[in-house]
Amino acid sequence: MALQVHESRIPSLRGLVCVSNQASQKYGIDDLKRWIRLNHEVFKAQKIDIALKRSELGMWDELVDHAEERGLSVSLSVDCSAAADTFFSVINPSSLLDIVLKPKKIPSENFDLWLDTASRHQIPIRVQWPMPIHRTLPSSSFGERLSEAGVRMVHFIAYDPLRKDNNILTNKESVESIDSLSEWVGVLEGFGIEVNIIGFPFCSLPETLWDKIYSHSNAHIDHQQYNRISYDMASRLKDRSPTVAGKILQIYQARHTFFDDPIDQRLLPWLLESPWLRARVVAWHKLTRHRRLTKAVPKALPESESSADAFMSRKKSEWIQKLGPECGGCRLKAICDHAPSDFRSLMPGINPKAIAGDTVMDPLFFVRKQLKFYDDVDQERLNLPTATVELATEAHDRIHNTPPTMQIDSFQYSIDGQWCHQLPGGLRWYGFTNSEKVSTPLATLEPPFTLSYVVGGGIAEYAGFSLSKTSRLLCPMEGYNHTLTLHVDAQGRYVLLRDGTPMAPSQFEGHYPIPSKLGTQLEPRICFWNIDHSVVTQNVDIWTHENGTFDGVRSAKYTFITVCVRYARRLQMVLQSIAHQEGISHEDIEIIVSYVPGVDSTEDVLDTIESAHPNIRILRSTYAEENGRAKGLMINEAVKKSTGDWVILLDADTVIHPGLMQQVEQQSDEAQFLIPDGRKLLSPETTSHLLLGDKKPWEDWDKLLTTEGEMRSREAEGVPIGFCQIVRRACFEKVQYFEADHFEGADWQFSVDMREHFGEEIRLLGYPVLHLDHGGSKWYGTSRHY
């Protein structure tokens, strides 16, 4: 496949797992599987390099199976110290996306044998080329040899941070290697091989090579590099014992559920920064477990423009003091890796020097038009889906042919929780720390809508929109000025545009999975990550259709909240039981359904209920599949959208009595927490009749209570669990659901907390609920769409 130029880069989705540390101690197989899972679930990798030595081949099949079960494309990374045939007596070549060859020197006999073996098996090759570059190696004939063997990319590296045996060069070798780079770059690109240069400061290379240099500022937005956080994890584990590494991986995995153990949060950085033994870890835990761990108190932020400028001036002085007068005063200091101690010791005779001129902030300033290779995984990411192209066309037509419905000026929004400088026509954001910053809500919007803003006067790592606690739609800032646009159609499909070009939202570590669709009643905010000094956003333009803005006038008496994941058929019966409440106007009912779009027919069910009962307001709260078990999170986020005096938390398999809301209506103002009088577990046969419409609970309630099945009245030792909990909305200001990536025990704990704050619950005697059978599956669904 020929090299291509794409000015808008796609970020790296390549992870890295090393089977052993620098002392050649193997990590445990379960810890390696955990590491692979972290790359997939937390670091959002789509492909993974597994660095393996000959003595570790026995682990290969199990690791590859584990990666492939998660849809990861696997590459083999080797140092070429052992013969290739030994590896391929175990490894199935068809299981490999490509091979990464990382020899200690080039040329070498084993490196040549690896080229021949990979070529014979028709496996693409990536090469990490260490220094020095030998002057006696004929560039033209060797470049042809690499091309014919299937080499698609070469990284020229000053040194490898993951190796302890990097080559130490003489002054002469350092100078000769740098002099040779220009010739080699031209030769390799002539043979269709992508070339990158890593670990070199700009000032050490001629300007003609600057379009190949990758550093901390741009590696994460280049598909050929490693995912930054995945690579950082490998770097931190490289000198850890298998015991300590295993503990780090376990803590890190727990850290990225919604449950954060404060002890683990203290223990993790301690383990990462110091190679402590497990015995000392256990001792530390025992000695400090009785202490009350508190969060650090944040430092006060500047409260005026002058104090903000003074703060940034101090930071600049610290920068120069830290980097030295050469790097601190260089125009490329923001995008260069400078000359760290490893570089100076391994490549002596190359001294940094300041490059005069205006400071360059754009991380792609030099590499934007670089020739790049795209493998099958990355080529697919380049090809935008047809729906995305259609949505982008809609957005362009709306923006260029119709005036905005409204405009939010710089005095109508601010930065949430931080001082900002509001100017006529613009709002200045300051980057006091490398962190996320979001605006206050711009508006409450109902799809379809389009909103757009211009950012300029500086640069941040990412820019875009925040839509909820778990949803960010961001893309890299590649220049000083961008127009960011979010266009959402009536079905919740969306496209993120940067300067009119569709962008795939960036994947992030942890809690920000990319949603497939957006819900209703959205409160978008402007969002930036890692602002360098400051940026300015201008007024925000918003285009809406009729009823595109949420007026907030109509309030419900009753808000039903249900979480539905693969329970669509049962959900339909549950919603019907709400719609058939006796003596209650549909105008007083609001239903919020939290669900994962695309896993079942929930959206069709909601469309049907809306058509059949148009006076019931139905809100859709959508989540990515990664959040599909986080029921507490879904409930808390739905409560924020609710308007009812009463909030009824109802499982998607729980049918309520037709007179239940009338009983709630009769409660005194002092009532805060109500529950039904137990639940009747229906048999599979009775459930089937209900789902097929043969029986209707609002007509056959008493008969259904007498059918086969268990009646449960005071389970969980009398503590109300979560199939149906009826709560005053004001109570959620004090008590919320525990937000974990599972649900076990959270409903029980919620009831315990409600009792503590508001007293005992009131049981609605004679009004149980019907629990539809679902074959023993969990509330978060199964592979069957019941």
Image (cartoon, rainbow, N blue to C red):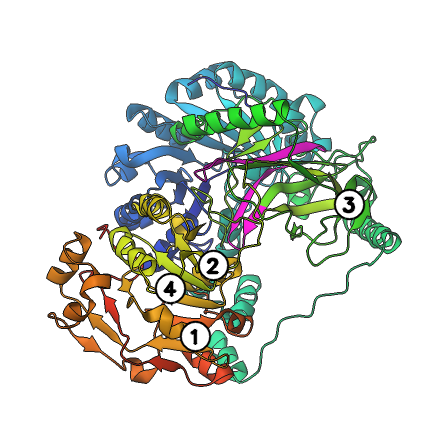
Residue range (magenta): 466-494
Closest to the observer: 756 or 313? Answer: 756
Question: Which residue position holds label 2?
Answer: 638
Residue 428 image label? 3
Q: Is residue 414 visible?
A: yes
Q: Indicate the secondary structure of the residue bearing disc 2.
A: helix
Closest to the observer: 346 or 226? Answer: 226
Q: Is residue 269 left or right of residue 39?
A: right
The amino acid beneath tag 3 is Arg
The quadrant of the image that shows the N terminus is top left
Q: Say whether residue 468 is magenta.
A: yes
The amino acid beneath tag 2 is Ala
Q: Earlier in the sequence, mark 2 or mark 1?
A: 2
Measure how far apart labels 4 and 3 are at the Cα level: 40 Å
Measure how far apart labels 1 and 4 are at the Cα level: 14 Å
Q: Say whether residue 512 is magenta.
A: no
Q: Is residue 334 left or right of residue 71?
A: right
Residue 574 image label? none
| Residue located 49% across and 59% down the image | 637
x then y, percent, for residue 766: 27, 79
Query: Which mark's residue is nearer the viewer, 2 or 3?
Result: 2
